[in-house]
Image: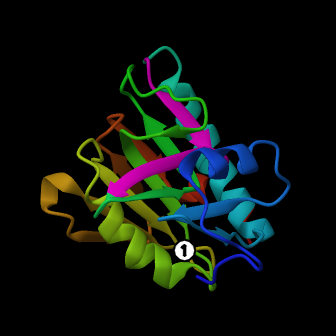
């Protein structure tokens, strides 16, 4: 990731204020902001398919499901970090800040060529530090492949190319056919 052009170190409050209503989103790591790239049609379809499939299971559960626009906040080594996961699910009734969540149980990232390394390494290691996180899911957009990492299996990767993705956080299964519906 490359810092936004002309960026200077921002406080958390300055960052959150600058993101409110901004056309371009930025992730934040220890005072530095990083512009996010745009998404492809495949990326958008996969994210929407997963969020739509999960929504009915979340309704009435006390959990909150977000796609694309809710930040997750982490604190690592004295630094505040804000990422924008593609899908975030929080079931903690105390986790209700206006602009971010700190206690998600599920995070999904749809991989793209420009973010795959970041999602597989930096974010994967950072997200493991969230005590409430039970599952981290990586979804390929150039092939039918879903990788799920579960705290319950010591974050070992389970790779699926067909069948059902089982999500422990909601005790629900999503078919890969549904995840990739209408995706060329």
Percent x, y for residue 173? Answer: 40, 43
Compared across the picture, whether 152 is left or right of 140 comes to left
- The residue shown at (39%, 52%) is 74
Q: Secondary structure of the magenta portion, mostly?
A: strand
Q: Residue at x 30, y 70 (%)?
A: 125
Left or right: 129 in relation to 182: left
For the C terminus, the image quarter is: bottom right
Q: Compared to 121, does 168 lie above or below?
A: above
In the image, residue 27 lies in the stretch drawn in magenta: no
The location of residue 148, given as percent across then percent down, is 34, 63
Q: Is residue 139 above or below residue 176?
A: below
Horizontal side, residue 41 vs residue 2: left or right: right
Eyeballing the image, is 144 above or below 28?
below
Point out the image quarter for the N terminus: bottom right
Query: Circle 1 sits on which residue?
Result: 140
Crowd tier of the residue under label 1, counting other residues whose Cα lies within 10 Å: few below 14, some 14–19, many 20 or above: many
Give the x, y percent position of residue 45: 72, 58
Magenta residue span: 62-75
Foreground residue among 4 and 160? 4
Residue 13 position, x and y percent, is 60, 44
| Residue at 34%, 49% in the rendered image | 166
Residue located at (60% from left, 67% from top): 9
Residue 34, located in which quarter of the rendered image?
bottom right
Residues 138 and 27: in front is: 27
- Left or right, residue 161 beside residue 86: left
Q: How many marks?
A: 1
Residue 68, magenta (yes or no): yes
Q: Decide if residue 181 is in sight here.
A: no
């Amino acid at each position: 990731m490359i810092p936004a052009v002309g960026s200077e170190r921002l406080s958390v409050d300055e960052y959150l204020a600058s993101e409110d209503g901004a056309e371009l989103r930025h992730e934040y790591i220890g005072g530095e902001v990083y512009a996010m790239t745009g998404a492809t049609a495949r990326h958008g379809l996969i994210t929407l398919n997963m969020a739509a499939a999960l929504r009915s299971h979340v309704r009435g559960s006390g959990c909150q499901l977000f796609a694309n626009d809710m930040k997750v906040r982490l604190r690592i080594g004295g630094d505040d970090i804000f990422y924008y996961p593609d899908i975030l699910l929080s079931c903690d009734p105390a986790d209700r800040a206006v602009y971010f969540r700190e206690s998600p149980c599920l995070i999904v990232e749809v991989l793209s060529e420009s973010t795959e390394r970041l999602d597989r390494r930096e974010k994967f290691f950072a997200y493991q530090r969230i005590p409430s996180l039970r599952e981290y899911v990586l979804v390929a957009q150039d092939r039918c492949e879903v990788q799920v990492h579960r705290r319950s299996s010591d974050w070992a990767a389970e790779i699926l190319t067909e069948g059902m993705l089982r999500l422990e956080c909601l005790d629900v299964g999503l078919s890969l056919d549904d995840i990739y519906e209408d995706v060329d």
